[in-house]
Image: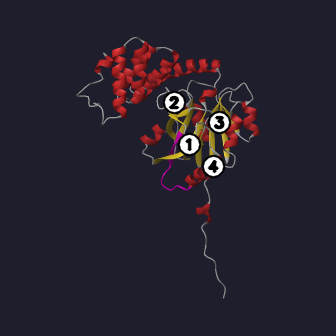
């Protein structure tokens, strides 16, 4: 008797194709490490260059990347979206040249391409740092990051992996996000635990100075474009504080809080700025309210006890 084997839907066993989309400028130091980390994971690499003068373009092309060119226009979303528009993969992965995906996480990420109803995934970026005074700093349990460095990291969460063909795009000239579009269009997303590893502390001192000036200008531009966004005012305040403009940072944080952006990070930053500006009482109150955000059941975060008005007066 002839036995007919059951039909197998092989498509259900296949992973969806992934396009890696990046933007870069003078990233020859880190680019190869990033591209090595996605070998065997992505099917296509698209890099939008905004004016590199080093070997970045040659490195990208040696690795089979399609390199597009977009003159810098003080807006990170523009090159991001140029890359997305050219992507042919079913899914899009967003990385920066100074980031990697650990090889042990490749399979888990590929599994996500089988998702039927979820179209966007938020991933946690582990921003490795050495200064425990940074807001949100967490010590690494084994005392080393993947490159063997000591210290810890500051986590940040945003959409980095999403389905192609849905019109998803980045918005915001600085700290650009796809999350705005996803939320506004009510696309279904999910936060996952697959991390992205980021080493921002590798930047050279002269490059840091250049970036401080750039980010300050972009922060100012963003609040002009989005004047009612507490997030935008908070981002500007961080740039101002880093640049040493503490009075301006205090104004921007207060503006952010008046627009509803209230939480531990802005309050801690406000406490530091007030302390350095010689305002110990306002510094103490801001720090107290930051603690209230962390332990609301143990402290009087209820505004009927103490409000934030004293901080803004």
Question: With respect to residue 141, does 215 lie above or below?
Answer: above
Q: In the orientation shown, which residue stands out farthest toward the bottom?
A: 1
Is residue 213 visible in this depiction of the protein?
yes
User: Which region is colored magenta?
Assistant: 114-124
Is residue 86 visible in this depiction of the protein?
no
Mark closer to the chain start, 2 or 4: 4
Mark closer to the chain start, 2 or 1: 2
Question: Which circle, 2 or 1, is nearer the viewer?
Answer: 1
Name the element at disc 4: helix
Q: CA distance from mark 4 to mark 1?
A: 11 Å
Q: Nearer the viewer, residue 293 or 157?
A: 293
The magenta stretch spans residue 119:
yes
Name the element at disc 1: strand
Q: CA distance from mark 3 to mark 4?
A: 17 Å
Count of numbered badges drawn on the protein: 4
Question: Which circle, 1 or 3, is nearer the viewer?
Answer: 3
Residue 285 locus on image (x, y percent) = 33, 21
Name the element at disc 3: loop
Residue underneath mark 2: 175
Q: Residue at x 40, y 17 (%)?
A: 250
* Badge number at residue 148: 3
* Badge number at residue 66: none
Residue 294 locus on image (x, y percent) = 37, 34
Binning the other alpha carbons within 10 Å of mark 3 as few (below 14), some (14 to 19) or many (20 upward) gives few
- Quadrant hosting residue 311: top left
Question: Which circle, 2 or 4, is nearer the viewer?
Answer: 4
Kindly check if marks 2 and 3 are in contact, taking CB atoms under 8 A apart as contact. no
């Amino acid at each position: 008797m002839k036995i007919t084997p059951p039909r197998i839907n092989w498509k259900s066993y296949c992973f969806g194709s992934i396009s890696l989309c990046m933007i870069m400028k003078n990233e020859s130091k880190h680019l190869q490490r990033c591209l090595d980390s996605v070998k065997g994971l992505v099917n296509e690499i698209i890099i939008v260059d905004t004016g590199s003068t080093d070997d970045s373009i040659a490195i990208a092309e040696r690795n089979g990347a399609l390199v597009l060119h977009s003159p810098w226009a003080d807006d990170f979303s523009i090159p991001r979206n140029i890359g997305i528009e050219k992507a042919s993969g079913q899914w899009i992965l967003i990385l920066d040249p100074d980031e990697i995906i650990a090889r042990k996480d490749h399979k888990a990420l590929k599994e996500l391409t089988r998702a039927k109803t979820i179209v966007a995934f938020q991933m946690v970026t582990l921003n490795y740092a050495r200064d425990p005074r940074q807001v949100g700093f967490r010590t690494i349990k084994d005392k080393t990051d993947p490159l063997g460095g000591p210290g810890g990291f500051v986590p940040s969460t945003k959409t980095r992996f999403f389905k192609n063909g849905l019109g998803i795009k980045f918005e915001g000239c600085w700290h650009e996000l796809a999350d705005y579009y996803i939320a506004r269009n009510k696309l279904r997303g999910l936060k996952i635990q697959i991390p992205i590893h980021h080493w921002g502390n590798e930047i050279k001192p002269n490059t840091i100075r250049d970036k401080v000036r750039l980010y300050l200008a972009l922060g100012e531009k963003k609040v002009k474009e989005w004047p009612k966004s507490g997030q935008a005012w908070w981002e500007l305040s961080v740039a101002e504080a880093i640049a040493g403009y503490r009075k301006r940072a205090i104004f921007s944080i207060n503006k952010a809080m008046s627009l509803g952006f209230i939480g531990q990070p802005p309050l801690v930053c406000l406490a530091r700025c007030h302390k350095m500006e010689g305002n110990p009482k306002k510094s103490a109150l801001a720090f107290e309210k930051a603690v209230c955000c962390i332990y609301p059941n143990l402290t009087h975060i209820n505004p009927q006890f103490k409000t934030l008005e004293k901080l803004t007066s």
